[in-house]
Structure formats: C-alpha cells, structure tokens
Image (tube, rainbow, N blue to C red):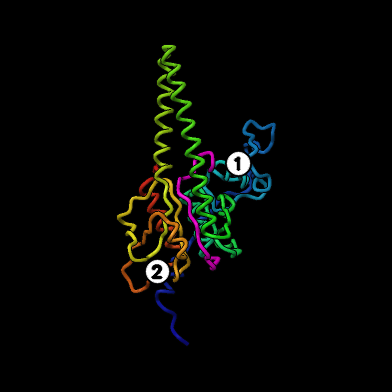
Amino acid sequence: MHEPNPIDIAARASGEPTFREVGVGPWGETHPREPRPDNPQSPNYSPRYDPQLLDEGDRRNVLDRYRYWRVAAIKADLDQRGRHDFEVAVENWTHDFNIGSMVRTANAFQARRVHIVGPHKWNRKGSLMTELYQHVEHHPSIAELVECWRMRIAGEIAATQAEAQAAALHAHWAAGANDARAVAAATSQVAAAEARLRELKAAHVIAMDIIDGAVPMETYAFPKRCLLLFGAEGPGLSSKALELADDVVYISQFGSVRSINAGAAAAVAMHAWIAQHASIT
C-alpha cells in the first residue's frame, strides 16, 4: 500500500476547499421582519418578484440586485439599462459547449444580440440559463443574417435622421419665440442624434478569422456599432462570410496551433470591444 502523499494530507488537514454559499435563502428566512414584495398590499411590492423563488430561495448565478426577480423582469431591466452596441454571430458551430459558452459571455458583456447561423439545434446546458436573458436569433445562412443586420442599421439611420430633423425644427421655432431653454434642449437633442448617426454610419460587419490580409485585433479600432462573426474551430468562417465582412480581424497567437477554442476566441474579442467602448463604473 502506498504512503499517502504529504500534499494530500496537508490539504485535508487545512479544511480546504471551503466554498461560500451563493445566493439567498427563502425570503422569510433572509428577511424575517420584512413583508413579502410579491404581496400587492406590501409597501415594497413589485411585480418583478417570483413567488416560487421567494418561497424556496434564489441560488441562481445572477447579480445580487436581481435576487428573487422573474427571468422576464431581469431581461427587461437589462434592455432598459441599455445593452452594448455590438452583436455576435456564430456560423455553423457544432459543439454545444462552445455555443453555450459564447452565449454566457455575451450575457456577461451585455451584447445587444446573439445570432446562431446554421441548422444546428444546440443544447443549452453550457450557457447555464443565461440565454434566457439574451436576445437570441437563428438564421438559415450567413447571407440572410448580414442582410437583416444591414437593414436594421439602415432603419435606425432613417429614424435617427428624422429625430435630428425634428429637433432642429423645434430649435428653430423655439429661437423665434425667444425660448432660450427650449433652444438649448433641442440643440442638445440634435447633437445627440448626430453622434448616433456617425456611429450607425460607421457600423461594420467584422469577421474574426486568421487569413492573409487580416488585421491583428490588438491594433484594431472596433467600431462602436458592429456585428462580430465567429466561425467553427479549424475551418474558420465560410468564404461567403469573409466576402460579406467589412473587415477581417485575427487574435494574435504565439504557439503552434492555428486557432484557439472558439468560445474562448469569442470571449477575447468581446472583451476587446468592451475595453475600447464600455463605460466602467
């Protein structure tokens, strides 16, 4: 019989690992002196709360501010607080874990939308339920996805141009009425609309792949509004996806393999956008 490894003995004696408890227990135990917030008669009532979670506790992997909230309420709050201006798409990924990992990362970085291209029906276990809080769309082909995305951008440009024109007209009439406060407010609206227009007109489809002529991500300035395309491990993106992209960007690597894990590559690229554009508070 082998002698126990001294490291194993020391580890057991230390009492580690010890894991902290995640989440909260039932409302009555956690807040014994407070009325339940799902009771319309309570001063702290809100329809956002889930009665079952209040009864049983909430051990989900969510921020503390969302404890006991319904899934739909969390998703609506993320929309209201404002999602980031990048979207991500995966083309013909076949590994469920990679798709789930990408969706989970998209939730962490608050991507505007997630697009899944191709016929694969993925098993959502790898996303740990985070797909419930995301806007996930399915597309039969990369061409259909890119066309829909460009049409959506075109629609937003038209709406923003109309908003800018209306604000400019309001400023003109306010100036005629000598209403300085209204002029200032309308002028600010014009400036904000024009800034959004510049971002929308600079929107790009970006293919993340290692091919000749691609730009290293470390030197690339991501547009604020963009669609990031990710291909399957090994073969990468299809020739059609590369043809439709405005730019092709690659993640610099220094080992012997051609590509890193697809889910990891998506996470690295999303964080690169975050580093350039997200407001950290």
- Callout 1 secondary element: loop
Q: Amino acid at mark 2?
A: Ser
In the image, farthest residue toward the top: 177
Which of 127/242 is in front?
A: 242
Question: In terms of secondary structure, where does tag 2 sit?
Answer: loop
Residue drawn 67% across and 38% down? 38
Q: Callout 1, which amino acid?
A: His
Q: Is residue 11 left or right of residue 115?
A: left
Placement of 81 over or under 259, stated as above or below: above
Residue placed most toward the observer, 172 or 42: 172
Q: Nearer the viewer, mark 2 or mark 1?
A: 2
Let me know if residue 16 appears in the view.
no
Range drawn in magenta: 78-97
10 Å crowding of disc 2: few (<14), some (14-19), many (20+): some
User: With respect to residue 54, does 195 lie above or below?
Assistant: above
Q: Earlier in the sequence, mark 2 or mark 1?
A: 1
The residue that disc 1 covers is: 31
Q: Residue at x 44, y 16 (%)?
A: 174
Q: To which residue does mark 2 refer?
A: 259
Taking the spot 42% from the left edge, 78% from the top edge, the residue there is 5
**Is residue 93 in view?**
yes
- Residue 241 lies in the magenta stretch: no
